[in-house]
Each structure stands twice: as structure tokens, then as C-alpha cells.
Amino acid sequence: MPILESTYKPPFWAKKSFVSTVFSGLARKVDGVDQTRERIPLPDTDFLDLDWSYAKQKSNKIIILLHGLEGNAQRPYITGAAKHFNSNGIDAVAVNFRGCGGEPNLLFRSYHSGATEDLDATVKHVLSKGVYDEIYIKGISLGANMVLKYVGEGRELPTELKSVIAVSTPCDLKGSCGELLSLKNKHYAIRFLAHLKDKLKPKLEQFPNNISVADFDSIKTLIDFDDVYTSKAHGFKDALDYYDKASCLQFLPNIKVPSLIINALNDSFLSAECYPVKEAKQNSNVFLEMPKYGGHVGFIGRGNVYYNEQRALEFVSNVKKR
């Protein structure tokens, strides 16, 4: 599909990547979203917490929302999307990945960028309600990589799944990790690593045969974390094997569901490989939009409706017209 020309124009003060990224992550507030939590069992005896919010009128349409690294269903980029879709007659269900809902998960494993089995379980659960004829999925950052991998892996997808949206997508995990470890992103990397290690620490006592104190103390960077924990806990050889197998870039040619990717050109988390121009041009189902501004999930818009939220609604609404 030809590359889409973006119409995004940020406020004058939000053109710098750092400003838009930090403001959107730390300063944005979204009110008026009434979420109801449901816990669902997973096939491996673990669980997911889902936070539902509803349109005012009964709806047969729903969007599944996937957060980013160390996020949750209460982050403004999730509640903002839920509010916008609810206001336009579409229900929303926001997934808290394993261990991200405010309570530790039960197993040594947790979540990662390629854990599409948990997304598949969520989709099947939503369909089991017998209410929804149309399902859309929107992923942010880590969740964006997950949803594109999900629709490109070759599984049989339900006919109810009509389209997906991926925002600030690290299509190449190795490249994205390299950017996060660069000096310009040091403050972000330190923050992410601190959250990840805090969550891992209780597992030292819970699963002493799986990870030692020495292993834990050896974690100094994000790639160390993926070497010591993410890869080992989820069946990969090491961090590089995880990045290679979980990156969505390789799955984009197989996508058969209309999929919109919105990656800002000034996103400091993304490497050159995270802008899949060739893949978009060769697959009529992949729509790539590359706004000049927006940072990482920082597409600040008028009335506290972010540009990516507006575009997501436009995209799902126009799928039938294509």
C-alpha cells in the first residue's frame, strides 16, 4: 500500500520528541472513563485482568487495547483511546498484561513483545460473550509489536476481527533496544529497568530454582534483563534470539487484515528498521503513516483527543469503504 501522508500538526511547544513523549506519559490526564475489571484464566493456569468500558448505547463493536512496556490499562494513552471510542458508540476492553494489573502473576513467566498467545486468549474471550460482530485491536509500543505479530503469524483469525492499529511500533526489537540504550535515551532506559527489576525481585523468593540473586545482580541494562529473564522465562536462547523471533517486522508481509502503523519520524525509541516502508508498499493491507512529529506515543491533539486516537477511529470506520 502506498505510504499515507500524515496531517498531524502538534502544538508549537510539542514539536520536540522529548517534550511530547514526557508530557504525554507524565502530565496527560484523562477523566470520565468508568472501567470494570474482569479476571480471566489462561490455559497455563495464569490469569489476565481486563478492564472494560462501554458506549452509552448497547454496541456490537469493540476495540481491544494493548499497553506498552511496564504500562497498564489506566495509562492515559489507553484510557484516552477507550474514552474516544466509547464516545463514538464502541465498547473497549483494555488488557493488563501478566503482572501489570496491580497484582503479581502466578508463574515465573510474565509478558513480552511477542506473547501473542495472551492476545489470542483475550480475543477468544471477547468473542465468547456472543455480543460483538466487529472487533478492532489497537496496540501501543510493545503492544503494537504484539498485535502486528498476532495478525501476521498465519493463525486463523476470526472473521469478526476487522482491523488493527499499531502506534509507536518497535518493529525491529534489536534496533529499538539499541536506541533505548543510547545516551539520548538514558533517562528512559533507567526508568524502564528500575520498574522491571522491581517487578522481578519477588520472583527470586517465589522461584529460586529459576533465577538466583547473582543473576538478578548481574542485570545492569535492558539487554541484560532480556538475557537473564525475558529470554529464559519465555523459551528463547538469549536476548538476541528473543528480539529476532518476537519482532513483528518479519510478519508484516503475511498480514491479511487492514493494519495501520503510525510511527513518528522523531520517535527516539525507534531505529531505521522500525519504519517498514518496503513492507507497506508490498502489502495492500499494511498502511504506514510517518508523522514528522509525535515522539513516542506523544501525538498531542486538541480537546485532549490525541491524533493517533482520532486516526484509529477514522481507520476502523473506513475499513468497509476500501
Image (cartoon, grey):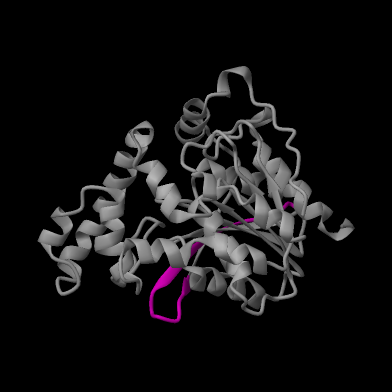
Q: Residue furthest top?
A: 12
74 lies left or right of 54: left
- Does the rendering let one see residue 54? no
Q: Residue furthest right?
A: 321
Taking the spot 25% from the left edge, 58% from the top edge, the residue there is: 200
Horizontal and vertical percent position of residue 20: 53, 29
Number of numbered discs visible in the structure rendering: 0
The quarter in which the N terminus is drawn is bottom right
The quarter in which the C terminus is drawn is bottom right
Taking the spot 22% from the left edge, 64% from the top edge, the residue there is: 203
Horizontal and vertical percent position of residue 104: 32, 62
| Quadrant housing residue 155 | bottom right
- Residue 121 against residue 261 in the figure, above or below: below
- Residue 187 against residue 244 in the figure, above or below: above
291 lies left or right of 217: right
Q: Residue furthest left?
A: 214
Q: Which residues are magenta?
A: 40-56
Horizontal and vertical percent position of residue 317: 81, 53
| Quadrant housing residue 87 | top right
Taking the spot 44% from the left edge, 33% from the top edge, the residue there is: 26
148 lies left or right of 191: right
Magenta segment: does it hold 250? no
Question: Which of the two residues, 296 or 34, is positioned nearer the viewer here?
Answer: 296
- Does the rendering let one see residue 105? yes
Horizontal and vertical percent position of residue 302: 68, 28
Taking the spot 54% from the left edge, 49% from the top edge, the residue there is: 274
